[in-house]
Image: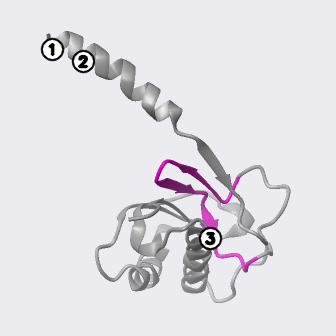
């Protein structure tokens, strides 16, 4: 009986997940010609592409180092979330990529100011290089609707 139930679950769960439509989201004003979307929505889950601290509609990073880039990256995330019908309080997971792990404390101070209560799960790691020469890149998973 248990094997039959397990086999049925293994068959039906992937079919149900696969039946959900994938919606590609491109935020107005985002740069054209990039090989990725601003976000992808499947069901009520929103998967955001990584955001660096670039000023909206440009490839120019916010001036002022890691704190300024972190602030701008999260503002960029907020824009994608709001356009997609979500918000920072619906973020469930973030991954933070730092060019230099010694920037952790400065990044974390700014990051924490955006997630003061009930922060999402998070991983932080150092990378050998980031897009546009950025010091930080942040990607998120969020829910849409409540």
Tag 2 secondary structure = helix
Residue 49 falls within the magenta-colored stretch: yes
Magenta span of residues: 37-56
Q: Residue at x 38, y 79 (%)?
A: 115
Count up the numbered dots: 3
The answer to which of 67 and 73 lies nearer the viewer is 73
Q: Tags 2 and 1 in contact by the CB under 8 Å rule?
A: yes
**Image coords of residue 37 (percent x, y):** 70, 54
- Name the colour scheme: one colour
Left or right for 26, reference 1: right
Relative vertical location of residue 119 with respect to residue 11 in this rendering, above or below: below
Question: What is the quadrant of residue 119 in the picture?
Answer: bottom left
Relative vertical location of residue 80 with respect to residue 4 in this rendering, above or below: below
Q: Which mark is residue 6?
A: 2
The CA distance from mark 3 to mark 1 is 45 Å
Left or right for 143, reference 70: left
The answer to which of 128 and 59 lies nearer the viewer is 59
Q: Residue at x 61, y 81 (%)?
A: 72
Relative vertical location of residue 64 with respect to residue 70 in this rendering, above or below: below
Residue annotated with mark 3: 83
Tag 1 secondary structure = helix
Task: Give the crowd class for mark 2: few <14, some 14-19, many >=20 residues within 10 Å.
Answer: few
Q: Residue furthest right?
A: 33
**Image coords of residue 87 (percent x, y):** 48, 73
Label 3 vs 1, first from the N-terminus:
1
Q: Residue furthest bottom?
A: 64
The CA distance from mark 2 to mark 1 is 6 Å
Residue annotated with mark 1: 2
Q: Residue at x 53, y 54 (%)?
A: 47
């Amino acid at each position: 009986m248990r094997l039959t139930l397990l086999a049925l679950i293994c068959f039906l769960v992937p079919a149900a997940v696969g039946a959900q439509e994938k919606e590609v989201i491109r935020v107005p004003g985002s740069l054209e010609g990039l090989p990725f979307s601003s976000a992808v929505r499947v069901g009520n889950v929103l998967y955001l592409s990584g955001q660096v601290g670039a000023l909206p509609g440009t490839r120019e990073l916010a001036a002022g180092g890691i704190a300024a880039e972190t602030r701008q990256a999260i503002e960029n995330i907020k824009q994608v979330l709001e356009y997609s019908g979500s918000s920072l309080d619906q973020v469930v997971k973030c991954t933070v990529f730092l060019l230099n792990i010694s920037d952790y404390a400065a990044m974390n101070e700014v990051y924490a100011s955006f997630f003061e209560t009930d922060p999402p799960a998070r991983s932080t790691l150092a990378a050998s290089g980031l897009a546009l020469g950025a010091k930080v890149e942040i990607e998120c998973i969020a829910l849409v609707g409540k």
